[in-house]
Image: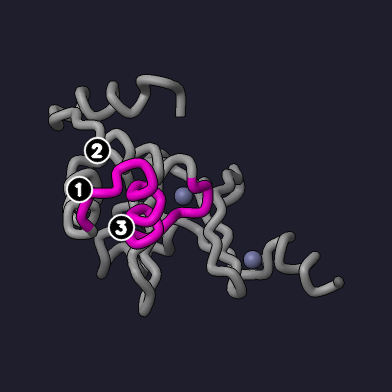
Amino acid sequence: MKRGEAERILREQRARVTPQRVAILRAVESSGSHPDADAVYRQVSRGHPHISRDTVYRTLSMMEEKGIIGSVLSVGNSKRYDPVTTKHHHLVCIRCKKILDFSAKEFDRLEPPAKMVSRFQVLRTTVQVEGVCEDCRNRKKT
Ligand SMILES: [Zn+2]
Ligand SMILES: [Zn+2]
């Protein structure tokens, strides 16, 4: 995220720009692995030691509602936030729980079957590929 980018995004969405909000948005962006609220809190509190966990949680929800950030649905886990709100897909490492973005035209073209669409209003289709990431595979060899 470029300098001033977080401020610009907040302003565009008519959200008040505060140093804490900028730090929260930057933390989601810079993590690179779709952090959960706790990870964002840990990161932000380094620069803002007085910020409360509650503020971080509420700010993330607000940003998601405004479409500033997205989230990845992971059933049974804490919600993971996503700085990318345009169409993309996810690689989920089953060992370290890291979530990586990837784009693939083949997956973008996927159409839900007509039988499903008649019973379920489809808003978006995202492919989630589960497996073991490079870091975890390398770790095992040593
Ligand atoms: Zn991994
Ligand atoms: Zn993503």
Residue at screen point 33% across, 50% down: 45
**Would you name the residue on which mark 2 appears?**
21
Q: Rate crowding at label 3 as few (under 14), some (14 to 19) or many (20 or more) other CA atoms within 10 Å.
A: few
Q: Which mark is residue 42?
A: none
Q: Which mark is residue 122?
A: 3
Label 2: state its secondary structure: helix
Three-letter amino acid code at the position of disc 3: Val
**C-alpha separation, residue under disc 3 versus residue under disc 1:** 28 Å
Q: Position of residue 29 (x, y in %)?
A: 43, 40
Residue at screen point 61% across, 48% down: 106
**Would you name the residue on which mark 1 appears?**
59
Q: Nearer the viewer, residue 80 or 117?
A: 80
**C-alpha separation, residue under disc 2 versus residue under disc 3:** 32 Å
Q: Which residues are magenta?
A: 31-52
As drawn, 54 above or below 97: above
Q: Position of residue 116 (x, y in %)?
A: 35, 68
| Badge nearest the viewer, 3 or 1 | 1
As drawn, 128 above or below 81: below
Report if the CB atoms under discs 2 and 1 are less than 8 Å apart: yes
Quadrant in the picture for residue 86: top left
Q: Is mark 1 within 8 Å of ligand 2?
A: no
Residue at screen point 33% across, 64% down: 79
Q: Nearer the viewer, residue 123 or 62?
A: 62
Label 3: state its secondary structure: loop
Three-letter amino acid code at the position of disc 2: Arg
Instruction: Decide which of tag 2 and tag 1 comes sooner along the chain.
Output: 2
Q: Position of residue 50 (x, y in %)?
A: 23, 49
